[in-house]
Image (cartoon, rainbow, N blue to C red):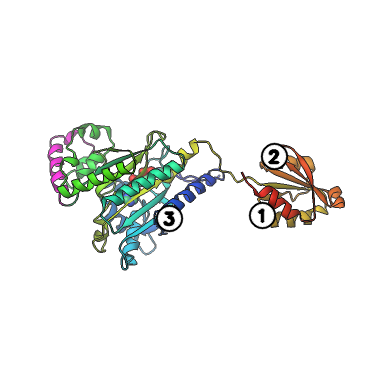
Amino acid sequence: MIQLIRGFKDVLPGEAELWQHIEQTAAALFTDFGFKEIRIPIMERTELFARSIGEDTDIVEKEMYTFPDRKGDLITLRPEATAGICRSYIQHKLYAADPVKKFYTIGPMFRRERPQKGRYRQFYQLDAEVFGSDSPYVDAQLIYMLKILFHRLGVTDIMAHINSLGCPECRPDFKDALLAYITGKEADLCADCRRRKDKNPLRVLDCKVPGCREAMASAPSILDHLCENCHVHFKTVQTALDNLETPFTIDKRLVRGLDYYTRTTFEMQTGSLGAQSAVAGGGRYDGLVKALGGPQIPATGFAIGFDRLAEIVAQAGKTYATDPDLYVAALGEAALPLVFAWISKLSETGIRAEMDFEGRSLKSQMKRADRLRAGHVLIVGDDEIEKKTAILRNMTTKAQDAVPFEGILEILRTRLGEKE
Ligand code: HAM
């Protein structure tokens, strides 16, 4: 038997209804906040990701699914959505009439990480990006929108962790301070960090290897090195969050695993997921559009780990199954064509109706109706055809009564249409 690839997974019926519920809740909320859906390809030129996410990040160095296409061009299965959305924004000059644009997208991403609970090689993200404003209020609004989404989905064990990574003006000063701190501690660092530290000392701060974490425990904080503008920006994010009654904690170690960030970075973390505590991550990336060949347009955004969010929502135990409203037990040759037309017309108008095509006994059809968790069963046999009335049984209360064939579709729509 051929099995699926390690780190990949199927979303089976049952779970898929929960995914639909999350997608619909998010799409409705994001639309109310002015976001429009964008759909971008799953593959892009490798260079796009290398230039945006950064050559010496784990994602680009170790985790991308990259291969030459038949002509030898290097292409990559997207490890995230921000780079592709930026590419699209620039390519189609979506900034032309009005640079402020808000997009969201939902889809699969690919990273060849070590699989474990909450960490997959194909995972889904619900991604939102805002272009054209460098206002701290936009950052605060994104975090607020995330909080509202989680609350609507019944997830309350959630906390916003925020930090600022400064800008090209103050970051060099911080990098120097960091490098000075690291100098002399090289022996305690992992091989990756020793290699990356000169070019990109921030990566050392983000390293999860215990030895590196220990060595960096009293590293200087970026927050002590912010320039005045970045400092005011970060303070305004905090005041705006306070005004929106959105709790947050300042996490000066929150560097994030992608190189494009400037100023505000954030993660939504939960205690409900074990080791993989980040359900969403994001931040501002004011230099990326320009770095990719577009105009100087600031931007900010986030991505929710859909699989992780679905796991937390599932913990609440609510089912989103779409059980049939009606199971029609057709008994005998004459009933079949009649009943077949009924179930087709009922399904067309939103009453989920099923039947048995194999002519099984009443007992086995009732068993099947039970298995499918149908709300009602309609019994139509030779007797019922003779009397031109069917028997309708409520599977919860077990009450049953006769329903005339005349106008039966209308009667069923009225009686079954009011779903609780
Ligand atoms: P990220 O932190 O790399 O950011 O990913 C965002 C979220 O995706 C994570 O918080 C996590 O919930 C989920 N995630 C990441 N990797 C995996 C995995 N292997 N398995 C399951 N879930 C995973 C970004 O991707 C940025 N593009 C976010 C962003 C948008 N920043 C600005 N705009």
Q: Which residue is mark 2?
A: 370
Q: Label 1 to label 3, Cα distance in Å?
A: 29 Å
Residue 254 left/right relative to 44? left
Q: Which mark is residue 347?
A: 1
In the displayed structure, 315 sits above or below 129; it is: above
Quadrant showing the C terminus: top right
User: Nearer the observer, disc 1 or disc 2?
Assistant: 1
Magenta-colored stretch includes residue 190? yes
Q: Which mark is residue 31?
A: 3
Q: Is residue 242 visible?
A: yes
Q: Label 3 to label 2, Cα distance in Å?
A: 39 Å
User: Residue 150 at what x, y percent from top left?
Assistant: 42, 42
Query: Bounds of the magenta span?
Result: 169-191
Q: Quadrant of residue 362?
A: top right
Write the residue at 25% across / 42% down: 163
Looking at the picture, tell me which residue is in the foreground, 97 or 313: 97
Q: Which callout, 1 or 2, points at the residue further toward the start of the chain?
A: 1
Quadrant showing the N terminus: top right
Residue 206 left/right relative to 101? left
Q: Quadrant of residue 133?
A: bottom left
Magenta highlight: main SS:
helix
- The secondary structure type at the circle numbered 3 is helix
